[in-house]
Amino acid sequence: MLRHAVQRLMMAVPVMFGVLLVGFLLMQVVPTDPAVVRAGPNASAEIIGQIRSDLGLDQPLPVQFGLYLWRLLQGDLGVSIINNVPVSQELGATIGPTLELMFASLIWSIPLGIAMGTIAAYLRGSWLDRLVMAFSVAGVSVPVFFLGLVLIWFVGFQWQLLPFTGRAGPLWTIEGLRAVALPAITLGGVFVGPIARMTRTAVLDVLGADHVRTARAKGLPEHLVVLRHALRNAMVPVVTLIGLQIGFLLGGAVVTEQVFSWPGVGRLAVGAITSSDFPMAQGTIIVLSMGFIVVNLIVDLLYGVLDPRVRTA
Amino acid sequence: MSATTAEITAPARPSTLRLLLRDVGAAISLVLVLLSILLAVFAPWLAPNDPYDTNLMAIMQPPGGEYWLGTDGQGRDMLSRMLFGLRVTLTMGALSLAIGGSIGVLMGFCAAYYRRLDAVLMRLVDIMLSFPAILFGLAIAAIFGPGVTAVVIALSVATIPLMARIARSTALVVLGLDYIEAARAQGMGDARLIWRHLAPNCLSPILVFATLRFGQVILLGSALSFLGLGAQAPIAELGAMASQGRTFLFFAPHISVIPCAAIFVVVLAFNVLGDSLRDALDPRLRV
């Protein structure tokens, strides 16, 4: 177990280093001078020069990279070109809403997808199975923004049931829940299909296994056979596959945030890129990548805990 | 030589196309895929109007009437824009798949053929796989500036590791077969062996994957354009059109819905076709 964990960590380190290096080089190719940005619009050449040497921008590139890493460790990601706010401050304000949106999407889509996949596998070949499979193919084919716009049009605009712009507060308040509902239905909606499909395949595999036949042979009630013997064993591949979909979730979240003006990191990143706010773009991309690497690492380690075979592989 | 080939293919196996057409869903999706390609290729001849021609006397016209699919917020013909949009979107997808796919296949074949390169190449693939396409899209748009080029680069890069894995695992199986040994014994060079014997026999899994990937690439590409990181105004691209239509969502929903529906139908067709192709070409994979 420990070896597996160490191996995975060893692999994550160069990847993280690579992300930081690319992030650093990104700032070298863009046509902005961080010293000028930090100094503000009315600064004299003297002050800019002072800031330049403070930031180490007059040093050779490798030294600059070291200084950059050092500043990063202290949480200094630079200052936005557009509104002069520290990047870390903006990121701090947007990470919460993004995690909130992902949580609210997964909390209903994972159980629903697993339930649909299990039923489809159990009733293999029935019309219900075909319906679930058709739903899941449609789910992986629909653009996230299409689903979002349709929900806005019907639920938000025509029926006036739920708000569809921005965030109204934390999840535990009624207003906050109402505001997250449509974005979470949108993002979770494209997730149900793939989960149902993966669960179906995994449960089908297990339903044919010897221990399931034994469970049936000893007269166990059918629902216990499915829940206790089939589904539980199918959970390992399902959990892994859900973990592998995190990239898909992240992509969906970026689009969903844009559609519903949800104040998350994805929307911040897109806004920064389209307005050429390079320090902000760099900061958001680094944080999104790091978050993704860490979550991947956690999923991998969890997989090792769930399935002993991985540890030795 | 011909005798052995005859033996292998002997039991009258129905052709892939025939197998495919047996399934109604597959047949419909094949027709839709071909139709969308034809519409995209012949868009300049099929479009009733110039997709960039604005008519301020007829903005936000609903579908039906003079303009079959209505007009957008600037009075441009939606049908013509959709046809041209399909052209841009499909081209973007095809380019990404062609570039990323060929690099990926080459990497996969090299990893399988030159065992010494295997570890290095596959580690590289692992690293590339640890980033979702959306992050490539954001980073590349940040470096090169938003545009179609950025999208094509991002989607190509995101396709490379996936294709490399498929190509490698397929090639490893094929390379273990006797006829490869025979070709080697005849003194055939590496490049020729890979091109003449390895590649043709790895074709079906790669083709299946490419079909399924094409749907994903279109979905991702249009999402990047929707975000404003891909095709820029006034280019008619389905994702960008859907995004522009958002402003008019409450007065003229068709401006957003038509390009969205077009993406949905095309991606769905490619996904269903890919699934059916996999079933037809490799029955073992059927679940």
Image (cartoon, coloured by chain):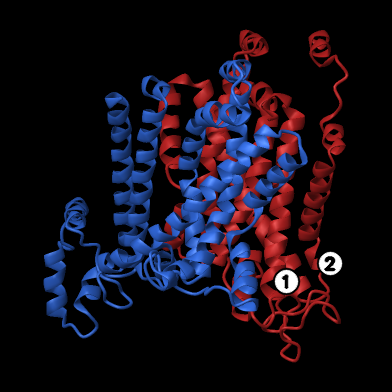
Looking at the picture, how far across and down is residue B144, in whole percent?
45, 61
Looking at the picture, how far across and down is residue B150, in whole percent?
51, 59
Could you tell me if residue B191 is visible in this image?
no
Query: What color does chain A have in the rendering?
Result: blue
Query: Which is nearer the N-term, disc 2 or disc 1?
Result: 2
Q: Is residue A245 above or below residue A237?
A: below
Spatial CA span between label 2 and label 1? 11 Å
Query: What color does chain B have in the rendering?
Result: red
Q: Is residue A85 above or below residue A6?
A: below
Q: Secondary structure at mark 1?
A: helix
Quarter-wise, where is residue B203 in the image?
top right
Q: Please, which chain is the residue tagged with disc 1 on?
A: B
* Same chain assignment for discs 2 and 1: yes
Numbered tag placed on residue B81 in the rendering:
1
Query: Which of A143/A10 is in front?
Result: A143
Query: Which of B4/B188 is in front?
Result: B4
Could you tell me if residue B282 is visible in this image?
yes
Numbered tag placed on residue B203 in the rendering:
none
Numbered tag placed on residue B46 in the rendering:
2
Give the label, 2 or 1, closer to the camera. Answer: 1
Q: Please, which chain is the residue tagged with disc 2 on?
A: B
Q: Is residue B222 above or below residue B121?
A: below
- Say left or right for A39 vs B25: left
Quarter-wise, where is residue A42 in the image?
bottom left
Q: Secondary structure at mark 2?
A: helix
**Which residue is painted at 59% across and 79% down in the image?**
B247
